[in-house]
Image (cartoon, rainbow, N blue to C red):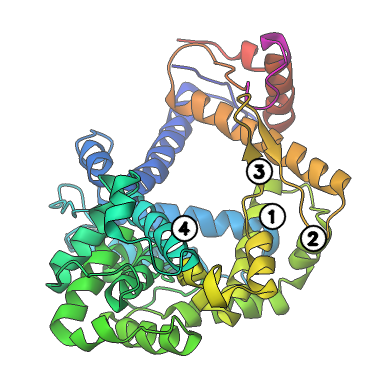
Amino acid sequence: MKTASMDHGGVSTPETVSGLANIILNNHFDLSAFSRFAYNQEFAKATAQNKLFESVGHAVQMTIGHSLMTVAATVDRDFAVLPDPRTWDEAFRKLKQEKAEGFCYGSRVVIWPIGAREIMEGQACFSQMQYLHFASGGSLEWDEFRNLGMLHGVYELAFKEFLLRTESDWPKSINDPTVALFLLVCDMAINPGAGLPFDPFPQFQSLIDDTLPGIRFTAMAATIRRECPQLLRAIINYSRSEYEEVSEHISAAVWIPSPLQIAARCKNWADGPLSSLMEEYRTYDYGSVNHTVRVLFSHFLSFSRDKWATPEFFCWPGAWMSGHNVSQKAADLFERHSALFVDRESDSGIYPRLRKGYKEDAIQKMFDDFYAANVVYEMTDQLIAKAGPFEYKYDWLKPSARPEEFKYFADDHFKGAYGVVPDEIPIL
């Protein structure tokens, strides 16, 4: 265990240090618990068995609340646009006192069949297969994809679950309305609107179901079977109108904000009260306060703005990047929202991706600042949660550098953040 002395009102005592350390440890665990519950079944089971785990609802509240506080401290200090999680405390306290399922210690923990991992792997795989299908003029189908080793294991788990929940047979073609609807449900499942950008009031008790991807996915699929099976044949042209009509229907049935409502709220922020952040995005000249948050949130707002305008592209990219739908607009959208950083087969490094319309030196500076902050985050994770001395496994920053250079780089940025060098922190 690593400990650091800290100033608490001018006097540091074992009690104040221990109390603050306990808060930091618990908050850190809650953030990790949410991501693990969202990820997949095995991670969720392991997290639920940890002695630090309180409840799924608590992990959701802490994660969304702390995330909002961090974003607000970066771009919206007065909560002029962002939901204010401080106004939720009484509602969550009441849920805990009433021992509402999922929001109190000892609550029954329901483990759902799939999580974000299976949904995103399925979304990526089926989008790629659709791209190859349309690019080949329809000649590539299920058997060819299986023979190519594309369709197996985690890549088809979400689709199998979707077919099970909707009581559907495996379709004859990758170009089938059932596949199109599956991809739309994937899109909706991994992009909740509860907490951000919409305040969950007054449906606090449904926040677990409204945010965790696996629950959202299975609930939407089951609702389609039960209430609107006609949607299984509704998507034929992969159009914006089909996206809007079907997603609005599903959203209304399960009582959640629709994807276009979510995108419109974020677009309005980008075009109005958060336009100064979007100017940083336009120039890649980001402020130094919470640099990583500024970069990621600005890209999220840019993505939301384009998603509002062309949701069909982001839901069915395979259909819009091949065949007769190929266009310069699709190419521009793909380029604008591609990965910020790339790797190489030849080494372990991560490198900035050159972007159309941006100066190379501005991209390099953003990359340097972004990953310097991420090193501090990783060192902080070690400080809180990992026993033993600090490790400096940062060869991805610069494969040719020596271990001593990694240590100097990490220690320097850690000291800049906390005022103490890692070697000065005692190991107990």
For the residue marked with disc 1, what is the amino acid?
Arg
For the residue marked with disc 4, what is the amino acid?
Gly
Identity of the residue drawn at 72% across and 15% down: 401
- Highlighted range, magenta: 395-405
Q: Secondary structure at mark 4?
A: helix
Q: Is the residue under label 3 in contact with that under label 2 (CB below 8 Å)?
A: no
Q: Is the residue under label 2 in contact with that under label 1 (CB below 8 Å)?
A: yes
Q: Alpha-carbon distance for marks 3 and 1?
A: 16 Å
Identity of the residue drawn at 28% across and 46% down: 154
Viewer-side label of 4, 2: 2
Does 273 lie within the magenta span? no
**In this figure, which residue is indicated by the disc labeled 3?**
341
Q: From the viewer's perspective, tell me whether residue 166 is left or right of residue 342.
A: left
Q: Secondary structure at mark 3?
A: strand
Rendered location of residue 259, percent (x, y): 45, 77
User: Between disc 2 and disc 3, whose residue precedes?
Assistant: 2
Which of the labelled discs sits on residue 65, or is there none? 4
